């Protein structure tokens, strides 16, 4: 009997518990049972596929089967799949992907739910694959369709390091001391944090302020624009974008970094950085105020920031100093479940005092001209930039994005220069010029996309508008000395004075409309249609006043120029694309009609040129694995002539070089082919990357410099006799020519040893360019070869020593078809080393030294400088987050370099003799506070492939 009582009690308790679990939320009681909602006729099923290391799996085949359905799809670049119009809530999923074991799962879901989001599905490696290749953990580098991804935890940096220190250790990355970033020979143009532009996209600010220990992955993305990111339809050439994804446990917290630095010769470097991160929410401020030295070239492979000084290259800009800085604010958040916003504001000032010394030679079919240019100048600019980006996920089928922008820049400048010419032209110009300018720019982009019920069928529309109004007022005071022959510079025949005030305006309105439609024709293929209309309208004016000896101004009607022109481009493209697990292929054709129109006020003739180009669409990528890929693509782009090139007018702003436009110019058209190969062998920690780029230009707009004899007269004050002499003045004309092309190749070979304690990295570039030009109506061409090899081992054998030797060898050779032109052959060997020594736990000594050997340039220009920098640091506090630093720059005072620029009609050597020997004392404080991984409703938030969180 007792057993029966016990059984009865257990049964009643079980029923009570079951009733509570099946009741309302929080165990609330209900009256009579509410009717169940009716089952949905159709539903959407989505999920994400990952591997055992939590990396998303791209291109996995998803097959859904039920009594009423058989559907198939593939995961996208974020590892996400979506199946629409699913009839039954009970189904079986089969997931297959090369290199992973096929998995099958059965799901029983609530048939009244419209959107079913499955838990992440983890694929396990296939056993027979593991027998063939024994990969120790997740590969450090993964190559995806348009993304190269680095696993940050495999690259060790010290505590309190910033992202730029992390990037230097990654294969194919080259970081400059000025914050520039190059990946596999191509410059990275924009920075993002968890998939959104960070601090207005400023790469230097992102990598020099964000701490390295928050990084989960570094991604280098080939970005074709926001429209392509949504539709998958690519057009034109991509730009390289850095995307930093944060660690899950570093995605909720606060970061602050404060730096105060004061040095000799009035140098200073003060910085403030603060950032709040909470999943998709980001609130930050960055401010810097610094007085730095011009003419110190940004370092290449071993460049550094944060007190670490890298080796100098053999080239640089002009000498002088720069005072620069300003605050930047960024804000990103989700306003509810449907709206995401990202906004930023930046104020920047830049006060540059420059010292420029250059020499060179100008080629002509009649002979050569040697020149020397010495100048000093002040250029003070202020810039405001604001942007607002709102994404509105209206529902599962409709999406809208609105991005207004505004910027304003103002500049004041003055310049003193002495320009000496000898040879076929024998003149001296003493110039005192000044100008003020302002340029407000505003615009907006609106994007809308509708996704149909049929999988992958979608239509989108993008509209954009940009308005800018540039106004410049300049003052010109020139003294021009004419000489009777080609070598005498003692007593001039004539001293001519020019004193003018010039007002210029340029009003630009740009419109763009783009319509894209995608129609799937199979599980893995689709047709893509895109139509674009692009219009750019220009209203330009120039008014010139002469200033007499009493300061009175008189307008020169013959120099007044009011000109309007427009360029309209239509692109109609039809493309077939197939995406297989191993390869993707796009084939199609684009029709590009263009129309160039213009007219000058008071001039009877008009410009009215139409053109038509029919170009192929070709993109192909083959992926042997997630570590090896090859891609090749073609693109074509028209470019309209500029205002100065097109105007039917003789511009005498510079009386020593009048410019005559050509209203018969046609738009140029550039054909580009790009091929890339990447292979990362995870077991050997060995990476090979190479790319080849070729571009060919039709109807390139080139200059035709015609040396025109000009009679120069003066009156003898004693005899009253009129004296005459002939001087050659170059008149610049423009014409269209064919035959210019450039072929370049970059490679990177990197090998890691002993758990990355030793990193050998070889980078190289080979470029051949054929340029065309005209001189005195005689067509000429120049060819230039450039070979650049850079070898930079990174040696970190233990926790207290870092040694980074670096050697680069650069050869540039050029030849010109003009009879009196000289061949150029310059060679630069740079030997350098930088490193750090840590001792007594909290002390560190850093150093860098660079010796350059230059041949092929006159010995009185370059002096093969030896530049040495050193610094030491002391860490304070329990977390070692307070750092005192003393830096010694250019100890031997030898920072002088030469930069040679070769053009189709000559070359220019610019000397740098920067005042770069000084001492800087600074203190920086690094603060961090973290609250763990972000959660919503008690559950960890899932993430997309770009690091953004799914609300």
Image (cartoon, grey):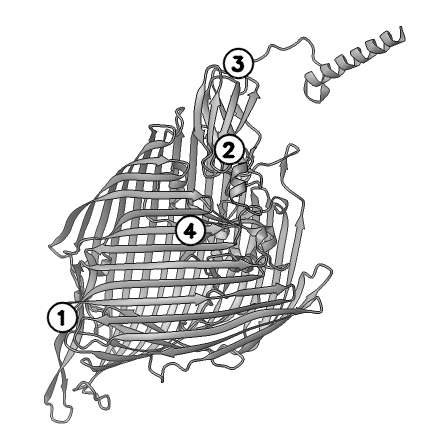
Sequence order check, earlier mark of 2 and 3: 3
Q: Is residue 551 visible?
A: no
Sequence order check, earlier mark of 3 and 4: 3
Q: Residue at x 67, y 8 (%)?
A: 32
Real-space Cα distance between discs 1 and 3? Answer: 83 Å
Residue designated by label 1: 776
Quadrant location, the C terminus: top right
Q: Position of residue 912 (x, y in %)?
A: 41, 77
Q: Are marks 1 and 4 in contact (CB under 8 Å)?
A: no
Sequence order check, earlier mark of 1 and 4: 4
Secondary structure found at label 2: loop
Q: Position of residue 530 (x, y in %)?
A: 30, 37
Real-space Cα distance between discs 1 and 4? Answer: 48 Å
Give neighbour class at mark 1: few <14, some 14-19, many 20+ (Cα, 10 Å).
some
Residue designated by label 2: 338
Q: Residue at x 21, y 89 (%)?
A: 488
- Nearest the viewer among 111 and 172 is 172
Sequence order check, earlier mark of 1 and 2: 2
Secondary structure found at label 4: strand
Q: Residue at x 19, y 49 (%)?
A: 596
Secondary structure found at label 3: loop
Residue designated by label 4: 678
Q: Are marks 3 and 4 in contact (CB under 8 Å)?
A: no
Q: Position of residue 240 (x, y in %)?
A: 41, 52
Residue designated by label 3: 39
Sequence order check, earlier mark of 2 and 4: 2
Give neighbour class at mark 3: few <14, some 14-19, many 20+ (Cα, 10 Å).
some
Q: Are marks 1 and 3 in contact (CB under 8 Å)?
A: no
């Amino acid at each position: 009997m007792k057993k029966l009582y016990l059984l009865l009690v257990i049964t009643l308790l079980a029923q009570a518990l079951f009733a509570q679990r099946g009741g309302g939320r929080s165990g609330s009681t209900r009256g009579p049972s509410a009717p169940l909602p009716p089952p949905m006729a159709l539903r959407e099923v989505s999920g994400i596929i990952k591997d055992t290391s939590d990396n998303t799996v791209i291109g996995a085949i998803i097959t859904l089967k039920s009594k009423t359905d058989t559907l198939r799809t593939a995961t996208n670049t974020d590892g996400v799949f979506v199946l629409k119009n699913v009839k039954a809530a009970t189904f079986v999923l089969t997931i297959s992907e090369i290199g992973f074991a096929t998995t099958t799962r059965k799901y029983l879901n609530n048939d009244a739910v419209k959107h079913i989001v499955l838990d992440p599905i983890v694929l396990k490696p296939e056993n027979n694959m593991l027998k063939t290749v024994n990969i120790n953990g997740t590969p450090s580098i993964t190559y995806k369709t348009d993304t190269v991804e680095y696993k940050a935890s495999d690259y060790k940096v010290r505590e309190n390091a910033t992202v730029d220190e992390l990037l230097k250790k990654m294969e194919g990355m080259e970081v400059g001391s000025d914050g520039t970033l190059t990946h596999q020979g191509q410059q990275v143009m924009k920075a993002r944090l968890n998939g959104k532009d960070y601090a207005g996209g400023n790469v230097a600010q992102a990598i020099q302020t964000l701490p390295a220990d928050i990084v989960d992955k570094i991604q280098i993305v080939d970005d074709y624009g926001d429209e392509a990111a949504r539709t998958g339809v690519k057009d034109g050439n991509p730009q390289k974008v850095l995307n930093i994804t944060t660690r899950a446990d570093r995605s909720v917290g606060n970061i602050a970094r404060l730096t105060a630095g004061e040095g000799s010769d009035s140098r200073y470097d003060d910085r403030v950085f603060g950032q709040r991160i909470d999943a998709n929410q980001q609130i930050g401020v960055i401010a810097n105020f610094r007085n730095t030295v011009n003419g110190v070239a940004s370092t290449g492979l071993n460049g550094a920031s944060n007190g670490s000084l890298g080796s100098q290259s053999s080239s640089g800009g002009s000498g002088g100093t720069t005072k620069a800085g300003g605050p930047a604010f960024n804000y990103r958040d989700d306003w509810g479940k449907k709206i995401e916003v990202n906004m930023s504001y930046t104020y920047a000032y830049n006060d540059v005092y420059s010292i420029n010394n250059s020499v060179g030679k100008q080629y002509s079919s009649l002979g050569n001209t040697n020149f020397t240019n010495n100048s000093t100048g002040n250029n003070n600019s202020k810039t405001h930039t604001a942007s607002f980006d709102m994404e509105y996920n209206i529902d599962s089928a409709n999406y809208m994005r609105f991005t207004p922008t505004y910027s304003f820049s103002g500049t004041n400048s003055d310049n003193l220069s002495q320009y000496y010419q000898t040879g076929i032209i024998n003149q001296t110009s003493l110039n005192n010029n000044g100008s003020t300018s302002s340029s407000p720019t505003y615009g907006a982009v609106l994007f809308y996309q509708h996704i149909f019920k049929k999988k992958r069928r979608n239509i989108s529309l993008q509209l954009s508008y940009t308005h800018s109004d540039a106004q410049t007022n300049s003052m010109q005071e020139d003294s021009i000395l004419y000489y009777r022959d080609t070598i005498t510079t003692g007593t001039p025949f004539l001293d001519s004075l020019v004193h003018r005030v010039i007002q210029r305006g340029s009003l630009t309105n740009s419109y763009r409309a783009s319509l894209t439609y995608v129609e799937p024709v199979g599980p893995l293929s689709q047709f893509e249609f895109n139509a674009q209309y692009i219009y750019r309208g220009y209203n330009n004016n120039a008014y010139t006043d002469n200033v007499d000896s009493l300061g009175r101004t008189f307008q020169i009607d013959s120099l007044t120029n009011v000109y309007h022109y427009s360029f309209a481009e239509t692109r109609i493209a039809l493309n077939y694309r197939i995406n297989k697990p191993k390869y993707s292929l796009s084939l199609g054709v684009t029709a590009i009609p263009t129309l160039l129109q213009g007219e000058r006020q008071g001039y009877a003739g008009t410009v009215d040129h139409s053109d038509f180009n029919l170009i192929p669409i070709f993109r192909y990528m083959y992926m042997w694995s997630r570590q090896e890929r090859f891609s090749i693509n073609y693109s074509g782009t028209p470019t309209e002539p500029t205002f100065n090139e097109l105007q039917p007018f003789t511009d005498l702003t510079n009386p020593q070089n009048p410019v005559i436009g050509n209203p018969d110019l046609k738009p140029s058209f550039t054909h580009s082919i790009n091929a890339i190969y990447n292979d990362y062998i995870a077991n050997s920690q060995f990476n090979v990357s190479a790319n080849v780029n070729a571009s060919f230009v039709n109807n390139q707009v080139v200059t035709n410099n015609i040396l025109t004899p000009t009679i120069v007269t003066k009156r003898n004050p004693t005899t009253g006799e009129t004296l005459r002499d002939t001087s050659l003045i170059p008149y610049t004309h423009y014409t269209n020519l064919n035959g210019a092309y450039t072929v370049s190749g970059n490679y990177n070979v990197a090998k890691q040893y002993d758990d990355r304690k030793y990193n050998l990295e070889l980078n190289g570039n080979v470029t051949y360019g054929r340029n065309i030009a005209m001189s005195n109506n005689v067509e000429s061409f120049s060819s230039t070869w450039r070979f650049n090899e850079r070898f930079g081992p990174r040696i970190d054998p233990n926790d207290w020593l870092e040694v980074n030797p670096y050697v680069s060898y650069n050869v540039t050779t050029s030849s010109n078809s003009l009879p009196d032109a000289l061949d150029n052959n310059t060679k630069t060997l740079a030997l350098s080393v930088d490193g750090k020594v840590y001792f007594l736990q909290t002390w560190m000594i850093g150093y860098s030294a660079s010796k350059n050997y230059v041949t092929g340039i006159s010995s009185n220009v370059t002096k093969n400088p030896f530049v040495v920098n050193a610094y030491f640091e002391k860490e304070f506090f329990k977390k070692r987050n307070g750092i005192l630093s003393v830096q010694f720059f250019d100890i031997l005072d030898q920072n002088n370099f030469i930069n040679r620029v070769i053009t189709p009609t000559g070359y220019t050597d610019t000397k740098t003799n920067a005042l770069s020997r000084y001492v800087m004392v600074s203190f920086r404080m690094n603060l961090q506070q973290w609250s763990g991984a972000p959660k919503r409703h008690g559950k960890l938030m899932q993430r997309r492939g770009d690091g953004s969180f799914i609300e």
